Image (cartoon, rainbow, N blue to C red):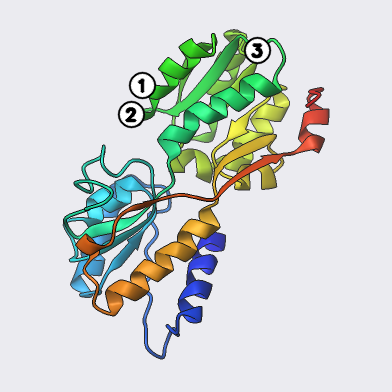
Amino acid sequence: MAVLLEAFRQEMSKLGWIEGKNITIEHRFAEQDPKRLPELAADLARLKVDLIVVAGEPTALVAKGATSTIVMTNAADPVASGLVASLARPGGNVTGFSNLAVQLNTKRLEILKDAVPKLIRVGLLRPAGGSDRQLKDLRLAALALKLKLEEIESQRDAKGLESAFQTAKQKQVGAIMPTTATTFFAERKRIVELAGKYRLPAIYFQKEFVDEGGLMFYGADYDDLYRKAAHYVDKILKGTKPADLPVQQATKFEFVINLKAAKQIGLTI
């Protein structure tokens, strides 16, 4: 998160917004505890901030009622979640950027099949109690790719992850893929370690997993999304209404393969 925040700040300073001089940035982090979000949003509302920049949809949905303006940096599917009326005409007090996470899941599944010879079963790691929105497209994609999708729920702790990987091994999956979730991003180091321990090829939704030693990443360039969010903040602070700024989808994508990780699990790419 710190890396992405830095990309946003640097872009803001390029646009002439200097902290302590003509702008004040208040930070609030839920520390992976969604229950804290309403309290944090209310806190920012009390401070009468001009706008709130949010990461992800759960935060945006909570913040929506707490302030006049919201800029999303990386919402998965803001129309489906009810954050905006449409991408072209968001209509309310919310605008920003979509990381196309839901749509890119199917592409990740395709890449996994290409990378792992004779792949038949894929373990789909999903957070317990998480949204089912990502599953519909993935189930259809798995059918089209002739893959068996083993859906494995993981509790929000280290033991839950270990147990999920043990289940994956019992179900004899040939590869693993976590759904796009902030809880998994927070536990990326542990997930990468477990994928190595159980010798399971995996594809991830953010490049930070590969930085931790993970095998593959395919997805939106998050640094780019945070930099672009700074431009929307700049426009809004200069008087543009959020309803007049269309929600933009990611246009820059990255595909990274860690050959060292492939070698460790005996996979030839």
Q: Which residue position is annotated with label 2?
A: 133
Q: Residues within 10 Å of mark 1 (few under 14, many from 20)?
A: few
Q: Which is nearer the eye, 14 or 194?
A: 14
Asked if the residue at tag 2 contacts the one at tag 3, i.e. Cβ–Cβ closer than 8 Å, the answer is no
Which element is circle 3 on?
A: loop
Residue type at the position of mark 1: Lys
Q: Quadrant of residue 197?
A: top right
Whole-percent x and y of residue 156? 44, 34
Q: Is residue 100 above or below residue 198?
A: below
Q: Which is nearer the eye, 78 or 265?
A: 78
Real-space Cα separation, disc 3 to disc 2, in angstroms: 25 Å
Real-space Cα separation, disc 2 to disc 1, in angstroms: 6 Å
Q: Which residue position is annotated with label 1?
A: 136
Asked if the residue at tag 1 contacts the one at tag 2, i.e. Cβ–Cβ closer than 8 Å, the answer is yes
Real-space Cα separation, disc 3 to disc 1, in angstroms: 21 Å
Q: Quadrant of residue 246?
A: bottom left
Which comes sooner in the sequence, label 3 or label 1? 3
The residue that appears at 49% across and 15% down in the rendered structure is: 142
Q: Which residue position is annotated with label 3?
A: 119
Residue type at the position of mark 2: Arg
